[in-house]
């Protein structure tokens, strides 16, 4: 019974993610697109919870939904006038976007069908244990091989530059 409920929750979250992603890309109002992106990020955290990755769910909510999306919203509010709309795209851009989307869907479907994913014996997917947070922390903040301190610090510098750029753009107005 638990497997069926997990499957129903997964499909529900996946459907909300797909619909919200499409609405985020096709919305003519930029603030609404940011709200649809927030819904996608929240549902992604729900997928992490479904996989018993509680730490990643909290990071998803705090860093992406809480930090980066708020930075996007501040940039939108600082740089756009009230009632700004996105300009309509010409038909060539629309068709090239549809073609790229279909190609991406085809490649993803091919890769999914070609490779056999072994989920049956994975205790994390089955929900039998939770990931050790000490290992995750060491991997994210370590300086050895396959550890990500440099990319983590580079991302923080990038976000600082974005914040300073937003302030400079707003200051010119």
Image (tube, rainbow, N blue to C red):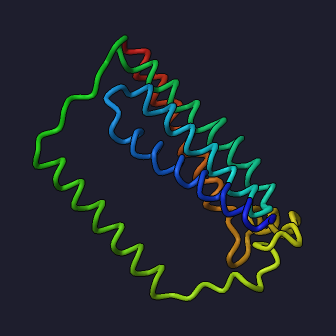
Check the image and report above or below for 14 versus 116: above
Q: In the image, 102: left or right of 95?
A: right
35 displayed left or right of 109: right
Choose between 145 and 86: the one closer to the eye: 86
Where is residue 28 drawn, in percent x and y?
Answer: 31, 29
> Which residue is rendered at x = 82% and y = 78% of the image?
123
Question: Of 20 and 5, which appears nearest the observer?
Answer: 5
Q: Quadrant of residue 125?
A: bottom right
At x 80% / y 62%, what residue is drawn? 52
Quadrant for the C terminus, please.
Answer: top left
Occupied quadrant, residue 33: top left
Give the tally of numbered discs: 0
Q: Is residue 33 above or below residue 74?
A: below
Residue drawn at x 27%, y 28% as measured from the top left: 86
Q: Position of residue 158 (x, y in %)?
A: 53, 45
Of residue 98 and residue 63, the one placed in the foreground of this image is 98
Residue 41 locus on image (x, y percent)? 59, 45
Question: Does 24 appear above or below 151?
Answer: above
Depth check, front residue: 171 or 34: 34
Residue 18, given in percent of the width and then of the height, sits at 47, 51
Q: Which residue is drawn at the image coordinates 64% and 53% (left, top)? A: 153
The image quadrant where one finds the N terminus is: bottom right
């Amino acid at each position: 019974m638990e497997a069926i409920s997990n499957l129903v929750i997964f499909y529900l979250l996946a459907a909300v993610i797909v619909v919200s992603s499409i609405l985020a890309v096709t919305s003519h109002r930029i603030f609404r697109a940011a709200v649809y992106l927030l819904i996608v990020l929240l549902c992604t955290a729900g997928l992490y919870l479904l996989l018993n990755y509680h730490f990643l769910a909290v990071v998803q909510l705090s860093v992406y939904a809480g930090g980066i999306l708020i930075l996007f919203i501040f940039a939108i509010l600082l740089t756009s006038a009230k009632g700004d709309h996105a300009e309509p795209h010409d038909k060539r851009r629309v068709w090239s976007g549809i073609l790229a989307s279909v190609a991406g869907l085809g490649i993803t479907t091919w890769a999914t069908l070609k490779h056999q994913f072994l989920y049956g014996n994975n205790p994390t997917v089955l929900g039998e244990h939770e990931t050790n947070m000490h290992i995750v922390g060491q991997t994210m903040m370590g300086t050895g091989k396959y550890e990500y301190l440099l990319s983590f610090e580079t991302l923080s510098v990038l976000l600082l530059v974005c914040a300073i750029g937003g302030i400079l753009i707003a200051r010119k107005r």
